[in-house]
Image (cartoon, rainbow, N blue to C red):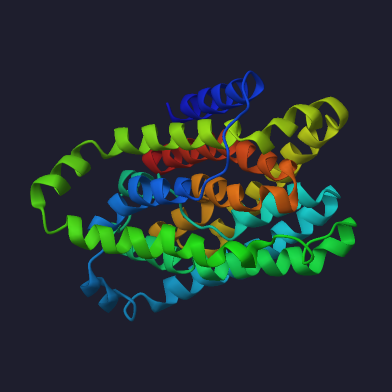
Amino acid sequence: MQLIIVILGAILGLAYGAYSDGFIFSSKICLFAGLTLIMPSLFNVKLRDVQLLWPHRIVIIKSLFLNYLVLPIAALGIGLLSHDFGIAAGLFLLSVLSGGGMVMHWIKKSHADTSLGFLLLFINLLFISLSLLMLHGFGLYSSSYFGEAYAEGPNVSNFARAVLILLVVVPFVASRVVMLIEPVVAVINRYRIYISNISIFVILVYLFGLQSSQTLFELYEFEPELIYVSLGAVLGFYLVTFIASMLTFDLVSKYERSAFWHSVTRYITLALVISTFTINTFGVSMLLPIMMAYVIQIPLAIMIDKRFAAK
């Protein structure tokens, strides 16, 4: 279902932009994403869950090591092989955004530990600042390899504060306020899957309807090979991610299964939202690996889930 929403949203957004002037970029899309995608997931994050850090410190350390060192290094290597600044940036952004909107769904289905799952979700949200810093470092030190300018124009550091406020601070504060009104929380939790799907659809239509996104048509016309390069890069990245996750975590443990899902899945929609700030910096080809991640990650997660069910 989500894959259909992704494809439909992208097509409608591109069609709108092609037959109109397109949307003008606004940072309000981050606020929208923060309140509709991130805030509901924070209802289950309790401050007392901090006490889980020490008992599960080994699992958490392994998760952080894999998600913020091993996978970014793998994405960097694969990105450099693509010889395209945008594709490499999109892949690197995926590598530093762990988990995702559906990660708790897969954690629950595989009978992993949900308390640790929510804690890891919150930790990864807090680490958005680190993710942005790493993306900034990627642009700063790899731009010369691709023959592109980065530091001279708008770059990640220009938008980091706004992204942190809109995607972390505001959703967390809003979640604490809304939690004081139990009927509202109950309604949001009841229709959460629908809210999430509608939010993803709106974000995709907006993103692909942006004026800058219309250059995807030019990319398809003049550099169609980048589509295949991007597909190969994303397939390679997910293969490395899956193998590294299998080797890192003991899937017999319900706690390590939670961490496993936070590694084998990436926060694709959040990557799309953040890319709205940086598409003019890295180029429109940055969208290609993020788009293709939907097509690869969702079937991969379904196959992994079936494997757990078979056991």
213 and 136: which is toward the camera: 213
Residue at point 54% right, 57% down? 97
Residue 235: x and y in percent read: 69, 42
Residue 26: x and y in percent read: 52, 46
Q: Quadrant of the C terminus?
A: top left
Q: How many numbered markers are drawn? A: 0
In the depicted structure, whether residue 266 falls above or below residue 129: above
Residue at point 52% right, 22% down? 8
Residue 159: x and y in percent read: 58, 62
99 and 143: which is toward the camera: 143
Kindly tell me whether residue 255 is visible in this rendering.
no
Report whether 94 appears left or right of 33. Answer: right
167 and 280: which is toward the camera: 280
Kindly tell me whether residue 174 is visible in this rendering.
yes
- Where residue 154 sits, quadrant-wise, is bottom right
Report whether 200 appears left or right of 10. Answer: left
Residue at point 44% right, 33% down? 202
In the depicted structure, whether residue 72 falls above or below residue 296: below
Residue at point 73% right, 32% down? 216
Report whether 142 appears left or right of 46. Answer: right
